[in-house]
Structure formats: structure tokens, C-alpha cells
Amino acid sequence: MSNVQSSWIPAGVPLASAALFGFRAVLVSLLLALSLPAGATELDDDEISAVTGDLEQQKQASNLELMTVAEQAAAATRALTALQQDIAALRSDQQALDQKIAATAARRADLDQRIAAGEQAMADLSERHDAVRLSLVSRRAVLAEVLAALQRIGRDPPPALLVSPEDALSSVRSAILLGAVVPEIRAETEALASDLKELASLRQAITEERSALAKALSDNDAEEQRLSNLAAEKEALHAESERRLEREQQRAEALTERSAELESVIASLAGEIETIRQAAEAARKAEEDRQRRLAEQLERARAYAAVALPDKNRIAPAYAFSKLLGALDRPVAGDTIRYFGADDGAGHPLAGEIVATGKGATVLAPVDGWVVYAGPFRSYGQVVILDTGEKHHVVLAGMEKLKVSTGRFVLSGEPVATMGQTRFAGASALTLASERPTLYIEFRKDGQPVDPRAWWKDEMSSGKVSNDT
């Protein structure tokens, strides 16, 4: 009980205002804890509605988030499929590039063989070229002698035999010389022409072979570079696709885990909402049964009161509290020093009234009612709360000794407590300059304080009442 009491008054509230906050919080807490009437059901319904509303909002938010996560998971699955297809295509392209690179390497090997063969052919041609050249050089002297003879004959031709018989011997000699030299010169000339033609063709073949090999080497190098670049690019794309695939797989796994968590949360929220609704329905039925039993008791009491005096052994109020306006006596004799709505000394309106009484005075129950709470409240002394029916409560505070306990039914005029010899420290701000013990009285309807003067006999007779309840 002490833990509950320590939370009734907010921190920082002045002592004079503490009575207003404290007694109101005491009443609300006790009504909620004991499932009593006077607005308890309405408060429970409001709290239940607030809790179920919050849970429904959380459930809707979780459903929306689950839908979003499901859409993201579907998108991640599509992205994974696309990445896997891209990776398969890259692998196929990589295989094709590997085949092309292998073919290029084979062509390069063939070119290398051709280059080696060309170099051997060029070496053979060079040897043949040198041989022909040496042959020409070696026959240069013979050719020069023949050419010189031919020049002499041309400058001094042999005479005709009929003109000059003396020169017949010279003509014969010249004919014999020409007959011996000309065929050899012709053969040498034909061999020389053939050698020169072969030399020219060899030089042309060597030049063409060199050009063809150079072009083939250049094309092969370009193809190797292109294929190498393509292979590097495909490898980079493959690595990037693998990294993206790993990221998407991690994202898909995270989305799957989040989806499972949200489904668990939604199921838990649905269970909590259903449990709260079932508990609220059970509490509502219990409250309806209790109200029905109480109404039956009150009806029996009213019926009995209509034909006879109230029974001293009754367990329900003899009269409806709303019918007792101007019919109640104050619970203790004394002087009222602060009325309902007056300044409580801290700038706040007083929720009840304060009566200065004598030392050790007996406090009586002003009306029939159930004791819903009887016990201490911090430094405000002993507190008694009566449920008088029709959602009304009477709060009495500032007493020293109690004569009743929680759960009892007391009759009007029955002693419930006695006052102390001095005022309590917690009520010092409410007692102002009075040194006498003070009793704090508060009437509540539906959990809200009302002016109690409408129920006092002396207030009605003096005409001081101005109450709008």
C-alpha cells in the first residue's frame, strides 16, 4: 500500500494543493484496484480503448511495414535472378573469349613458324644472291675481253675477200675468232640475264615476305590486345556482379528475417488485443453483475425504507444519496474555516472543506456507505473513503485513530475515527493559523469534487449554499 501512496501526489506540488491531487489520485487508484463503482468502469473502458487503439495502430504500422518489406523482398529476388542471369552470360562470354584467345595464340604460333621459315628462305635467297653476284664478278674479265674485241671489230671490220685477197687470212682469222667467242658470249649473256632476273625476283619476294610477316604480326598483336582488354573487362564485370550478388543475398536474408519478426510481432499484437478485449469483456460482465446486485440491494433498501425506519443491520444505503440534500450532519462538531472553492493558501481552489474541531473528537459517518479505503496517507493522517452509491464518494482525512476497516459497511452516525491532539504536519498549509486539529471533507461524483454544502442541514437552514451540482 505504501508504494501506491507514494505515487498519489506529483513531485513539486505544494502541500496545500497536495490535498486536491492526493485525495483525487487516492480515490482513482483505489477504485481501479478494487473494481468499485462510481466511474471505475468508465475509466477502465477508456484505458482499455486507449491501449487497444495503440495496439491496433502498432499492428497497422507493422502490417504496412510487412507489406513494404515483402515488396522489397520480391524486388530483391528479381534482382538476384537478373544478377544470376548476368553472371551466367558473363561466364559464357568469358569462355568464348578464352576460346578466341586460344585461337589467337595458335595463329601466333603459326606466324612464328612462318617467320622462322621466311627467315630461313631469306637466308637461302641471300646465299643465292651472293653466289650469282660472285659468278658475275668472276666472269667480268672474260666479258670485258669479249666486249673489247667486239668494239674493235666494230671500229675496223674485216675486208671483203673479193676486194682484197691479201686480207683473206685476216678475215678467216676474224671469222674463226667470232665463231668461237660469240656462242660463249651468248651463253654467258643468257646466263647473266637469267641470274639478274632471278636476283630481282628474289629481292621482290624477300620484300613481299617481310611486309606480309610484319602485317601479320601487327594484326596478331592488335587481336591479342583487344582480347586481353575484353577479358579484363569481363573479369571486372564478373567480380562486380559477384559482389552485387552477395550484397543482394545478404539484403534478401535480412528482409526475410525482418518479415518473420514482423509476422511474429503482428501475431503477438493480435493476441494481446484479443486478450485485452476478452479481459475487458469479462470485467464488464462482472461489473454489470455487481451493479445489478447493488441495484437490487438498493431497491430492497428503498422498498423497506418506504414502509419502515432504516434497519440497523442493513448492508446497503437506506436512501439514495442524491435524495439526501440538506439532510446530513457534519461528521464532526467544529468550525468550518475553509469552504469548497476557496483559496487553499497556495493559489489553488480547495476541492473540499476544512473543519477545525476539538482534540480527540469523534468522527462520525455522515451517511451510509461502504468503506473502500481506510488507512494512512503520508503525513495527512488517517484517511477514510466511503462509497455512498450513485457514483458518489465521501473522503475524510486528517484523523489519528481509525475505528473501521476497508470492506465494511457503516451506517450514518457510526464512529469511524477520532481526531488527534494536534494538527498533522501535512495539513499545516490547510489549517492556516489554527492550532486545533482539522478534518478535511471532500464529496466526489463520477470522480470529480463537488461542493458538500448542499448536503449539510445547517447550510440549508442558513441559506449559504450556492451549489450547481
Image (cartoon, rainbow, N blue to C red):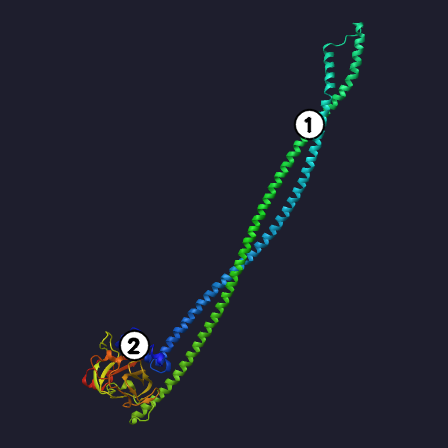
Residue 51 marker: none
Side of 435 relative to 95 (left or right): left
**Residue 54: x, y in percent?**
40, 71
Q: Quadrant of residue 283?
A: bottom left
Q: Which residue is rendered at x = 39% and y = 74% of the image?
A: 49
Q: Relative to residue 252, is residue 22 depicted above or below? A: below
- Above or below, 276 against 149 in this view is below
Looking at the rendered structure, the kind of residue marked 1 is: Ala
In the picture shown, does residue 293 fall above or below 263? below
Element assignment for label 2 = helix
Q: Where is residue 213 shown, x and y percent of the image?
A: 65, 36
Q: In this rendered view, identify the residue nearer to me: 166 or 319.
A: 166
**Cα distance in 3D space between marks 1 and 2:** 127 Å
Crowd rating for badge 1 (residues with CA inside 10 Å; few <14, some 14–19, many 20+):
few
Q: Which mark is residue 200?
A: 1
Q: Position of residue 7 (x, y in %)?
A: 34, 76
